[in-house]
Image: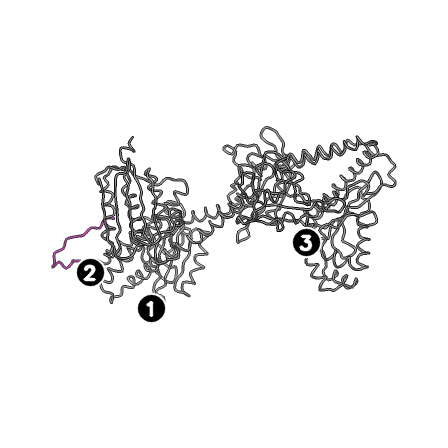
Amino acid sequence: MTVEHSKYSGDNPDTPTTQDIDSSRLQLLLALSPAVIYTCRPDGDYGATFISENIRKQLGYEPSDFIADSGFWASKIHPEDRSRVFESLPKLFRTGNSIHEYRFLHKDGIYRWMRDELILLKDQDGKPLEIVGSWMDISERKVLEDNLRDSQAHLEEAQKIAHLGSWHWDVLSGEIFWSDEVFRIFGVDSQTFSPTYKSFLDCIHPEDRGCVDEAVQRAVKERVPYGIDHRIVQPDGSIRYVYEQGRVTYSEDGEPVHMVGTVLDITDRKRAEAIIQGRLDSLTRPEADTVGLSFENLFDLDEIQKVQDAFAKATGVASITTDTNGRPITKPSNFCRLCRDIIRKTEKGLTNCMYSNAVLGRVNPNGPIMQPCSSCGLWNGGASIMVGDRHIANWLIGQVRNEQQDDERMLAYAREIGVNEERFRAALAEVNVMSNEQFSQICQALFLMAKQLSTLAYQNVQQARAIHDRDEIEEALRESEEKFKLLLNSTAEAIYGLDTEGKCTFCNPACIEMLGYERMSDLLGKNMHDLIHHHRLDGTEYPEEECKIYKAFRRDEGVHVDDEVLRRADGSSFVAEYWSYPMRKKNEVIGSVVTFLDITERKWAEEALRENDRIKTEFVKTVAHEFRTPLTAIQGFSELLLMNNQQISLEEQEQSLRYIYERSLLLSDMVDDMLDIARIESGAALSIKMSLCQVAEIFRQVEPFFKAQPSQHRLDVTLADENTLLNVDKGKMGQVLENLLSNAVKFSPAGSLVQIRGDLVEKSYQISVTDQGIGMTPEQVEKIFDKFYRADASDTAVSGIGLGMNIVKNIVEAHGGRIWLESELNRGSTVSFTLPLAQEIDN
């Protein structure tokens, strides 16, 4: 900006007054400020009466555009923001100030985010005189905020995913993000394939495409997660099976914003199911005579109990196997307290339950039976198990509620069977709630599994009548063991078995590999607590009598833990999540089965997330504090000057304007720091303009800093070989030196010495800044170059937002140099950095 001064004679009546000079100075400061200053009328259309000249730089318009057309400002506000802006204006007249952010159309046709801060000026009677506003472009800050929110959302979702492909769909923009695993499952190249909802549907098998689209649309409309099995067709024509699930997030207005989910490749599982079904279909029917057969004769009840327990746990329903009269064969699985401890404890309630069990188990070859329990009205389902045309057992599930249950009718039943109503009501509230659709799907799965058991019963009968000698029986046992080994060896989870003394009885390959051993014999017969579980997470000894894994066979109870460590063969350890469940034979606990996973990376990710949240919170607090202080001063002094109070002396006016100017430069520096960091984080290189210069020229960049320092500190500068040539960006090097000197002054006591040294060191020039300040601990030294780190964040009297040293490090490294810090608590600090000599860079 050029400021022209005319020459006047002392007697010239047109000689500018002091007020004219002050006005020119104010206009200059306003033009250099990062914020546009304006005034407008406090009523009507809020027409502008003054706009600072820097409006041209900020938005490309002329001040006269706003002053000549009272509706100009409102016409350029984004249509989606306009009503919100005007609705917030009444607050200004209630409180005297108002702040809002909105999008405003730049002259180049692109909307910019603006922060608009207004103050209402009133006369002595409280009547509004004028509105004074400060307008600042915050578009880059908004972009940073959006990027931070997106990254945080992706990270949170990633913690929930284990060995699955994940995806993220921006419903508004239509953009879809796939993880590398999803591209692999779909058999497409991430470099050439652009995932969109349409291209995703195109990958789905034509027969399944409609069901998948319907499930997604229902999830969006009804706000419920979805999960579905379906086929996909890879580019080479291969068909794979996947299990896909997803959920939708919504805006405050209730509109769908994002959908996130996972894709699991279940092709191998589907193929195994097809093979098993084929084998079952190939079996011949048993002989017609099925008299005398019972469920107990055909199946190992311990194995059936495990299957029943697992089904109940996975689906959230109660489960039991009964004979054809409704009498239990297996132990109840997942029974609710209402049925187990209240209704079935009464004679009438138990009788009704037995009758309901018998009704549910009646033969129905076409599907499961679903109906409310005749005892209390909870929904139940059942499927019959057959051998030929003989009905041998029922598999029953239920004890769930839906929206159709009448609580008052159920309480009336409580009175009928003579139980306490309050106790009945409390237990009723604990019953699992499930939609009819979901329960129906579970019943369909039950029917298929019961049908499989019926088929297996045929097989067992046929095999039992065909095996006549010991060799055939042993072969059948070997085949069963091979199937068990196949299942054990094919899983990626580590599994081992224990006897009642804690010794290993079996282990799978995943267990051997995860623990760092070479062969199964390294573990078999060994006390597993002594071998892999003898220390806690904090390194202290873990007594065997407190071992949670052993609770499974000592107390006959399942255990799940995710905060203990297991030891490898080489002595290293890892954080493990494990499950330990008892093994039984003929209702006697004979040991336990332990399954575990290495969750070290998951724990690291959780810790990194917590640290990220902490740093973000500290940064926001620091930035708010650092911006608020100068802004408050600028607002106060600007308001004072704009009132044009004749009682303010010229000296006071000049001091106020200088203070405004200095604080605006401070704000500009902080914004520049944040933008530098944003560019570095985005992968963009710092803008470095290299030129040959002598060391002495670099130090001339900070001469204003030396002159501006008060006399409380002594500065000692010693430069060896100051004519040494360096190839550097002088401005950036000045920024480095000023930052280091500023820190040395801020963190050292008045009267202390600050030394600057420059020396030739091998093929570099080394510059060091030494102070006699408070120093740092080794932990602080390690973090000093991290983003947002402040050595003493609790001292709000020391300004700064924790970006300076990180920027300094990036500038030095961009020049091919290195930087380090040496410090001792209460003994001062020395920051040193090197720069390559000019000829080294040229070479």
Query: Residue drawn at (32%, 58%), measured in percent from left and top?
Result: 634
| Residue at numbered disc 2 | 18
Task: Examine the structure image and report whether residue 539 is included in the region drawn in magenta.
Answer: no
Q: Nearer the viewer, residue 241 or 715?
A: 715
Q: Main secondary structure of the magenta part?
A: loop
Q: Where does label 1 land, which residue? A: 123
Residue 584 at x, y percent in the picture: 73, 45
Q: Is residue 824 above or below residue 491?
A: below
Residue 301 screen position, x and y as percent: 77, 44
Q: Nearer the viewer, mark 1 or mark 2?
A: 2
Query: Which residues are drawn in magenta?
Result: 1-21
Q: Nearer the viewer, mark 3 or mark 2?
A: 3
| Rendering quarter of residue 698 | top left
Say which of 812 and 565 sits in front. 565
- Asked whether, in this view, residue 549 is left or right of residue 453, the answer is left
Q: Which residue is mark 3?
A: 433
Q: What amino acid is at disc 2?
A: Thr
Quadrant that contains the C terminus: top left
Residue 350 sits in which quadrant?
bottom right
